[in-house]
Amino acid sequence: MTLTVEVCCVDGARDIISGLRGDDSLHTLADKIACRCGVPEAEQRLVLSDGSPLDHLSDPRSSLASLGISDGTVLTVVRVGVPQSGVYTGSAAYEASGYAYEVTLDCSSWRWTSIAHSELEIEIAYKVLRHPTASNINRQAIEVMQGSYDWDAATLHLHGLFMKPVSVEGHKERPSWLSLPRPGLVQAGFELCRNGRSTVDQEGLHLWVNGLGFDGNDEDWEIEYIGICGQFDADETEGLTFDQFQGFIELQELTDLDLREVLGSLDGSCKLADGTNVSDYIGHFRCTVQLSS
């Protein structure tokens, strides 16, 4: 038995897709929608008449019958390349700490990281409106933030690490590792601690633990280092290989933000003109921006 499915676009256009079978995959339907409606499969969000989404990106091999799609089913297709276009302005305020920012985003910089989960990256520009230190007011910078899109409310929820500006014109160049995922952060830590060697030796690992707040003396550290090498079966003279260093970091149960703060304390290229470390200018940012058509 063949199936006929009606497809509705959010702009009001409708199309009929026929010749389908119950054992056809969701990918087959998405491919036909792409051909008939001009919406690329990677940018489709399919919704049943009861509002339930069909996640064809995470499980494209599911049969139409298993998803409850039968003859006469009506689907709505939403194109999720960029839900809205244009430039939008919002604000982020932290009353308890006395901070407030004006946030401007241009949807042309919108990049999906997971359409299935409505997750994205987008570039924002922000300006300091309120700050405990008066000289910081009107300072501005540009950052790439992570976020999620609320389809029903047409709202962007943004979050991420940002560099607090150190001048009205902007701030020191953003460290290359600041936005890396966790494996990249660990690799950056290894590179900063190995001092040109192929391993992280006693001196290099001392740099790392100092960044975590280790306050023991040299004798304390030597005892600690020998214990770490024994725990990871590492040669005390050679030090830790990358895999051993990674295991050492994971044992400390550090968050990604913890890792970035340690990296900021280690990376000499991040020192500002006054000797202040760039890690002092790393903050966690949250903001909601309402998008309208």
Image (cartoon, helix red, strand yellow):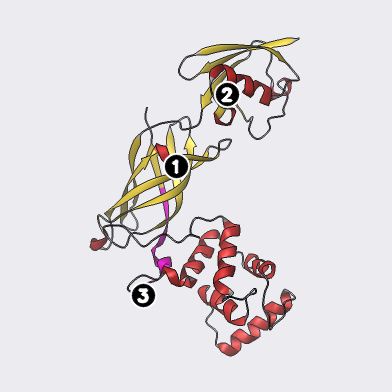
Which amino acid type corresponds to the residue marked 1 in the rendered image? Answer: His
- Left or right position of 32 against 37: right
Residue 246 in which image quadrant? bottom right
Kindly report the distance in space between the C-alpha atoms of the residues bearing marks 1 and 3.
35 Å
Quadrant that contains the N terminus: top right
Q: Residue at x 59, y 63 (%)?
A: 186
On the image, numbered disc 3 is attached to which residue? 275
Q: Name the residue under label 2.
A: 47
Instruction: Using the rendered view, name the quadrant where residue 90 is placed.
Output: top left
Please give the label number shown on residue 157: 1
Element carrying mark 3: loop
* Residue 224 located left or right of residue 149: right
- Local SS, label 2: strand
Confirm whether residue 242 shows in the render: yes
Q: At which x and y percent is residue 150?
A: 48, 35
Q: Does the magenta stretch include residue 126?
A: no
